[in-house]
Image (cartoon, rainbow, N blue to C red):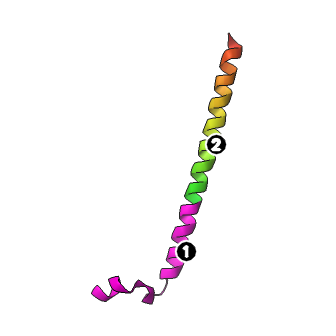
Amino acid sequence: MAGLTTAPEVLPGIPFARGLQEAAGAGFLLYCAIALTLISVKLWFAVRNLGERS
């Protein structure tokens, strides 16, 4: 087991798993950016329409 911690590249599938992890991280950041944008737009419209009601 000590040899596996020093050279993980010898295991098959490690580069593929690393690529999947990077893609998942990028997808999560994209999801967060879109959610933040939608929330910001919703709040902007709510504040904008708040003044028109009175």
Q: Among all residues in the image, which is located at the extreme front?
A: 6
Could you tell me how far apart the alpha carbons at marks 2 and 1 are, in whole angstroms? 27 Å
Which residue is found at the position 64% from the left and 40% from the top?
Answer: 38
Is 23 placed above or below 47 here?
A: below
The residue where tag 2 is placed is: 37
Residue 52: x and y, percent? 71, 15
- Give the residues drawn in magenta, as a range: 1-26
Magenta segment includes 15: yes
Instruction: Give the mark nearest the N terminus, 2 or 1.
Output: 1
Q: Name the outermost residue toward the right.
A: 52
Quarter of the figure with the N terminus: bottom left
Q: 21 above or below 11? A: above
Q: Is residue 32 left or right of residue 48?
A: left
Q: Quadrant of residue 3?
A: bottom left
Left/right placement of residue 38 relative to residue 3 reads right
Q: Report crowding for label 1: few under 14, some 14 to 19, many 20 or more residues within 10 A (C-alpha).
A: few
In the rendered structure, find residue 19 and report the number of the disc placed on it: 1
